[in-house]
Amino acid sequence: MLETLVSILALVLSSAKQADPPAETLVKLTVDPMPAPKPALRYLLLPELREMTPGNPIPNYLKCLLDQDFSTTDEALGRAALKQADRAARMDKPDWQILPRLRTDGVGLLLPDLQKMRALATELQKRFRDEIALRRFDDALATAKTMFALSRHLGEHPTLIGGLVGVAVATVAIAPLEEMLEQPGCPNLYWALTNLPTPLITFATGLEGERMLVLAEFRDLDDTRPMTAAQLKKAIQRLELLREIGRGEKKAIEYLGEHAADEKYMAAARERLIDSGIPAERLDTFSTYQVVLLNERMEYEIRRDEAMKFCNLPTWEAIPRLDAITPPKGRALFDSFTVALQKIRRAQGRLEQRVALLRHVEAVRLYAAAHAGRVPEALAAVDVPLPVDPFTGKPFRYEVKDGAAHLRGSPPKGDEQNPAYNLHYEITIRK
């Protein structure tokens, strides 16, 4: 599962840096001036309550994937599968039904269902683009609702990998949405975008699940009574395997032996464990290896929470604090369990920024509709609320050049030369 998380991060973030990458990703949009629809919420991007039916969408998504072959040349079969996905997206009680395995399988938990969801999103994106090409905007927005609902359901998966796949699926939906805005007659989606939740994909459940996953790996450690030699051997063998997966620098048994022989380390470990609530008389009955293992578990939990405590802050506050965490000198025994929360939070922030930028595009179209096709000279001239750049907490950069509006997002520190974090929308009003 650790290797899967690394690969998903690489895919979502697209952050592998080349020698001299382009400074930005330019998205050129030629759009119609368009006022807000009436009623204002005629168009939305998530299913409404009146569309919902009782049920768990997750097994229905999977049934759709298992029952149908998207590679079939029979278009009717493919359409039927996607209709089933539409119905699943409008069910009201998502439950991934993996909590028992989360408690027992730990970081070795297999998640084949998530990859299947990516395949489903790809097929929905194809339908989305077909509907846009035919200017069937109502149908296209119904597909957008399905895709964004799917991404939200993935965000409720009790793993960080599930949340990352949710971000990826939402990003897959945004690409054709941008194409739709360029179509003549496309309705204005400012209020539809504004009514999406912020953040669109939450990692709250995934963070809680991460704590459960690692807790499962500590199940063989006992702080209530002395562990037998057999119990210690079992715990150490399991740890050796996990450190091999996580590429630990030295064997666990070597680490334990070195620290058990370090009088200064052992004195500090005993003091910390007593402060945590283990009575001194009980601790005196534990072997040195058991003391080291319990102390290292606590060290992991402290390091983990030092990062996790920032994750639910606004993006512009969370990322600098995550980046500023200084790893203690020397690797701890359970460092292999540590997740790169900085990168995960960046992935979430990128999606937030993309949605916020599209709100600005639609605000420009609103303004142009009321001002003879002209773009605003400054964002302050727009009379609808505009979100801040999630990475800075400040307004987006904006200028008008040769009659076109130029809107730019700012990258987080360290990604100034990464084009994936330097989005530039050039908005031209169709005459």
Image (cartoon, grey):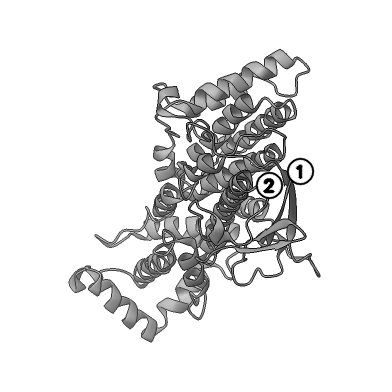
Q: Secondary structure at mark 1?
A: loop
Q: Residues within 10 Å of mark 2 (few under 14, many from 20)?
A: some
Residue 140 sits in quarter: top right
| Amino acid bearing label 2 | Gly
* Cα separation between marks 1 and 2: 7 Å
76 and 220: which is toward the camera: 76
Where in the figure is residue 39, as x and y percent of width and height? Answer: 47, 31
Which residue: 58% across, 44% down? 165
Q: Residues within 10 Å of mark 1 (few under 14, many from 20)?
A: few
Residue of label 1: 431
Where in the figure is residue 331, as x and y percent of width and height? Answer: 52, 74
Asked if the residues shown at circle 1 and circle 2 are in contact, with their CB atoms under 8 angstroms apart, the answer is yes
Where in the figure is residue 74, as x and y percent of width and height? Answer: 75, 14
Residue 59 visible to an observer of this rendering: yes
Where in the figure is residue 170, as x and y percent of width and height? Answer: 59, 42
- Vertical relation: 75 (above or below) 325: above
Q: Is residue 297 left or right of residue 114?
A: left
Q: Secondary structure at mark 2?
A: loop
**Rendered image: mark on residue 355:** none
76 and 109: which is toward the camera: 76
Residue of label 2: 373
| Amino acid bearing label 1 | Lys
- Vertical relation: 52 (above or below) 235: above
Indicate the quadrant containing the C terminus: top left, top right, bottom left or bottom right. Answer: top right
N-term mark: 1 or 2: 2
Please identify the residue farthest to the right as the structure is shown. 20
Q: Is residue 191 left or right of residue 93?
A: right
356 and 200: which is toward the camera: 356
